[in-house]
Image (spheres, helix red, strand yellow):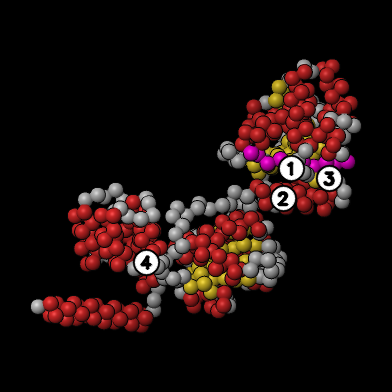
Amino acid sequence: MTAHDGASSSSCSTSGSSSTYDVFLNFRGEETRNNFTGFLHSALEREGINVFIDSEDLWGGEEIKSSLLKAIQQSKISITVFSKGYADSKWCLMELVEIVRCHRSNGQMILPIFLNVDPRDVRHQTGSFKGSFQKHKKKYDTKITETSKEALTLVGGITGYDLKQNQSKLVKLVVERALSESRSYRLVDVKNPVGLDDQVEDLLSLLNLGSDDVRLVGICGMGGIGKTTVAKALYNRIFKSFHRISFLANIREEALGPKGLVSLQEQLISTVSKRKVDDKIWNVYCGQELIKERLQGENVLLILDDVDCRLQLDALAIESNWFGPGSRIIITSRDEHVLNMAKVDEGKIYRLKELDSEQSLQLFSLHAFSRDQPPEDYKQLSQDVLQLAGGLPLTLEVLGSSLFGVSEKEVWHSMLRKLKRIPNREVHKKLKISYDNLEADEKSIFLDAACVFCWMEERCNFIMGSLWV
């Protein structure tokens, strides 16, 4: 501990501020640093949890230094380790007062641990805590002792952990809780989640989260139909149920980057283990072994978004027998054959469908008018746009956003005329990816079919025109 008396810290962050640390440990150093707290600190660091450690230069005179206050404030969780001599330390109590202030103002989580101490003694300042405060009354003013008592009363009343089992089991329980609570892995929610709830519920039934088997589920559909959107919504619903989690987005594009598949391997390892890779991956094969080492036997949620070839699956070491009980691997792809190569069972492939007319109108209106339905005098124009969009979410979003704030109806008519001839550039770019991924003979078949449809449409228009003459 420091030269002063033994209050020690490691850190955890408040929910309302920018997080620098995952955990802040508040404890009496001379009593627990070399046993329980030392074991806990090492275990937290092994799991990649960012823990703040105090040093002598954080203390000075009678005041707690601003750098230590900042460490408490920028932590997600505070773990307080109460031992018999805890309250003897003025510095422990001063840290605790700041921890409670952050808890009240920002909702910072507090996890109390009672080492051979009755929680009631902490809550009511009885037992060894009573003697400590009798000493403090002679040295410090009433304000310091009263605020410390208030902090002890609050934290002593929080359900925590006590030493009823051996220390190694207690350390494991606390680390698992810290891992679960320190995660800030929620993805940005979908702005306009039209039709998402039903799709997520369908996928939850395929995942069957209560079972201990390792399960692979695929999400399949054409470009722009919302595979990534659904995967993100599903992820946000279930990620807290897993010990290790990773959402690898845009795999097809990322694989074409400067480091290619190695970059994806580094992302996977760092997100799953919360530790930097530190240039340990020299090639794809090395990365495969490191992924196997880090994921072996672990309870994992892994989402691989936009996979388009076998090489990507192999590089990310997708073998179900490597994962621990209850793990779930979700793969999104435009190509159902990729899901077959990943050994996703036929019954575990979720095929996304286009939105129905009601959902299409709602999604388009939300982007074009920021409301569920278009104004009365724009309903027909909106329906005309929907005919071109065809229930594809990406198309609806792009077209709706491009018309947002446009009140001149002639502009709408002009866009409709243009869209009939030339697809929206952003939509066209996204959808063309599906075409580019086809083999040469498949592209020929696609173009032949497209020509037939164009001929049929022109022929139909000619016949209808003749009938009106």
Q: Given the image, on which type of amino acid does mark 2 rest?
A: Arg
Q: Given the image, on which type of amino acid does mark 3 rest?
A: Asp
| Cα separation between marks 2 and 4 | 46 Å
Point out the tag, 3 or 4, that comes first from the N-terminus.
Answer: 3
Q: Is residue 361 left or right of residue 119?
A: left
Q: Given the image, on which type of amino acid does mark 4 rest?
A: Ser
Residue at horizontal 63%, vertical 68%? 208
Residue at horizontal 74%, vertical 31%? 151
Q: Quadrant of residue 331?
A: bottom right
Q: Quadrant of residue 86?
A: top right
Q: Which mark is residue 111?
A: 1
Point out the tag, 3 or 1, that comes first from the N-terminus.
Answer: 1
Looking at the rendering, the stretch of residues picked out in magenta corresponds to 107-116
Q: Secondary structure at mark 3?
A: strand
Point out the tag, 1 or 4, that comes first from the N-terminus.
Answer: 1
Q: Which residue is mark 4?
A: 357
Whole-percent x, y for residue 73 in the image: 63, 34
> Is residue 54 shown above or below 370?
above
